[in-house]
Amino acid sequence: MNRLHNLFANKKSNLLSIYYTAGYPTLDSTVAIAEALENAGVDFLEIGFPYSDPVADGPTIQQSSEKALENGMTLNVLFEQLKDLRNRVSIPILLMGYINPMVQYGVERFCKKASEVGVDGVIVPDLPMYEYEKLYSGYFKDNNLSNIFLVTPNTSEERIRKIDGLTDSFIYLLSSSSITGGSLQVSTNIEDYYKRIRGMGLRNPAVIGFGISNSESYNKACQYAAGAIVGSAFVKHLATKNYLEGIPEFIKNIRP
């Protein structure tokens, strides 16, 4: 079991995850932000590795990726930074990004490096399920990495059950089919979608992302899932002057 498995085995509700982009706002801020978030009580983290064509990301995260690339962030730099990670951070860490940089780096090499520095899982929104299953799943399993799949309101029941069978930690439940950075609006259709997922009796818990920005949206998400992921709202916070010192207050505003 990795840290992610242990977390979900021992905590079933009100989980809070934070996403931010490696190398933003400064090249060397990645591990310091992770440490501050753990100290503020966050349950697990998603560290994004930047890419020049982030198709699922809204303007806030796109801009953070552009700045991180300008700062000099690459996968080589990120893995070098994360060598010190487990001396400072104990909560589960996932890397999130796109398949193109992973393929350029080498997927097997990527998984091995991620495992060496203490990463517990990877989220790759544009990795086709077929390719994962036929080409890459062995690399993930050999390195004790969880691969997290995304589900949207348009995902068929057949595909959701297939994803559930390939998953060993949690399912990333998108609050909509749009890009990141919107606001969570629990309409009747979305509520039905959450209830449908919950009623399927999946073996893996779900965590809701996209549009979680305050305590109201966080609490709504936790009514239907094991927890929620905050991304764009936190990346916006990182643009403030004293962002490290302000992290405890930011987290209190999400989960008092």
Image (tube, grey):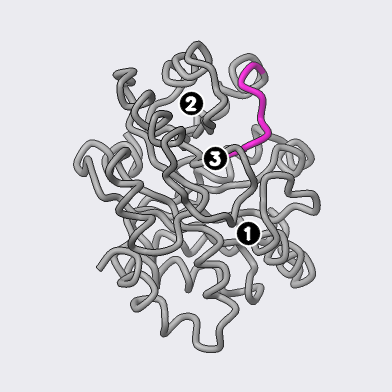
Q: Give the image location of residue 162, x and y in percent.
A: 49, 14
The tag earlier along the polypeptide, 2 or 1, is 1
Q: Crowdedness of circle 2 by 10 Å Cα count: few (<14), some, many (20+)?
A: few
Q: For the residue marked with disc 3, what is the amino acid?
A: Ser
Which stretch did the figure color magenta? 122-130
* Residues marked 2 and 1 touching at CB (< 8 Å): no
Secondary structure of the residue carrying tag 1 is helix
Residue highlighted by disc 3:
176
| Vertical position of residue 182 compared to residue 116: above or below | below
Q: Would residue 203 be counted in the magenta stretch?
A: no
Label 2 residue SS: helix
The residue that disc 1 covers is 78
Q: Which residue is mark 2?
A: 141
Res. 94 visible in picture:
yes
Query: Mark 1 is on which residue type?
Result: Leu
Which residue appears at 49% of the width and 20% of the height?
163
The residue under label 2 is which amino acid type?
Lys
> Which is more toward the observer, 57 or 221?
221
Q: Residue furthest bottom?
A: 241
